[in-house]
Image: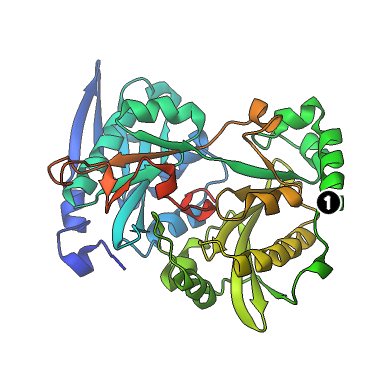
Amino acid sequence: MYYYGRSVVGQGMFGRDRMDSLERQYASGDREYTIRQYREGDREELLAVYQEVLDSTLSDDWFAWKYETNPYTEDIPVYVAEFDGELVGAVGFWVLELHTGSRQIPAVQSCDGAVRPEHRREGLFTELFRIGLDRFAADGFEIVFDFPNQLSKATFEKYGWQLVERQETYFRVQQPDAMVDGESVGPLSALIRGGARVLSRGYLAAKSRQRPSVADHPKIDVDRSATIPSRTLAALYRHDIPDKLHLVRDETFYEWRFGNPHWEYTTYVGRYDGSPVAAVTTGTKVDGGATITHLTDIVPLVSSRPRTAVLVSVLEAILEANEDAALVVAPSGVIPDDVLSAYGFRSDRTVPLSLVSTPTIHGVYALMDDDEADGDRWVLDGKRVTDPEAWRTTFSEYDTG
């Protein structure tokens, strides 16, 4: 476990005295801005910016969970732009613990970037981003990663980010009527308005006929819990830690990560002869009047035949419990593709989803220079960070899930 704060490292990494002194003046045309770190008295103004630009539902509870209760830092790594005494922009950074397959290191995910419309095209996002990256580089961080959408890809690449891959996502459309009647809910809204109601019903019916019967599975019990069984989940993670880049999933992680007030989380633990073998934590919320359920986290992260057999029963329990959801969404790479396909999930890389979806991009930024990184800053503990095969991620790695 890595902590970044005054109580651990004095006024070194993320020490408040050091961070509060970090302030820059930035001029754009005849406008002069102050670029600095977030202070305790900024919250109301900052949330007003976020609510105007990002999401009107972002709340005090959300901010407290994401930044103030983050167990990996005692500081709040949000940087703001001030103009005439008023906050007009901000960029946040999510401090996390990354496993490289051989060691645990501090890492950070950029997030929550927002600039008010009247102050755009002034270079503020670049300045806010730069001040944060400068601080993390000075504090010894090696890597920043993020999952922007396709529309943000060009912007990030301009700042020196490298593309890992276009993330594949699987969708199971269950209640197309609810999605049509509500407001836009993202990549599927255009598809459904274009006639996917019939497609989804026929597709799910066909898949229901094709998938294996529960009776074909070995005797497996699935426990459902509205609280996060952090000890059980951490033990399942430790049972088979992947030799890939991923977030460390220990008790501390699980006790904090699923406190996001915008989602309702439920954990399904699959047991064989009473022993836990695999688990899925789902996150559910209402978006535009439609209920959306994500398969947010899956452990163990490494596939095996016993794990897959148990995951089938866990997935059936999840779908039964969430049959009223308009949409169930799954990440790629952690549940076998053939299992997802058998249960009516469809990849956003295939038609018709590929025609209307706005894909999520996995990007990375190396904070070290080549000399510090033994000649190649894009290689971390023998893994090229731009190689999709070097990573194992679920929606837990996303700051929004």
Kindly identify the residue that appears in the image at 56 percent across and 75 percent down.
Answer: 229
**Outermost residue to the left:** 371
Name the foreground residue: 157 vs 56.
Answer: 157
**Residue that label 1 marks:** 210
Q: Position of residue 51 (x, y in %)?
A: 51, 40
Kindly identify the residue that appears in the image at 77 percent across and 32 percent down.
Answer: 192
**Outermost residue to the front:** 305
Kindly identify the residue that appears in the image at 22 percent across and 23 percent down.
Answer: 27
Whether 199 is drawn above or below 11: the answer is above
Where on the picture, by quarter, is residue 122? top left
Name the foreground residue: 36 vs 307.
Answer: 307
Q: Is residue 75 visible?
A: no
Whether 49 is drawn above or below 101: the answer is above
Q: Position of residue 64 (x, y in %)?
A: 44, 58
Where on the picture, by quarter, is residue 170? top right
Where on the picture, by quarter, is residue 206? top right
Whether 157 is drawn above or below 373: the answer is above
Q: Residues within 10 Å of mark 1 (few under 14, many from 20)?
A: few
Kindly identify the residue that appears in the image at 70 percent across and 30 percent down.
Answer: 351
Q: Is residue 134 visible?
A: yes
Q: Quadrant of the N terminus?
A: bottom left
Q: Position of residue 148 (x, y in %)?
A: 46, 37
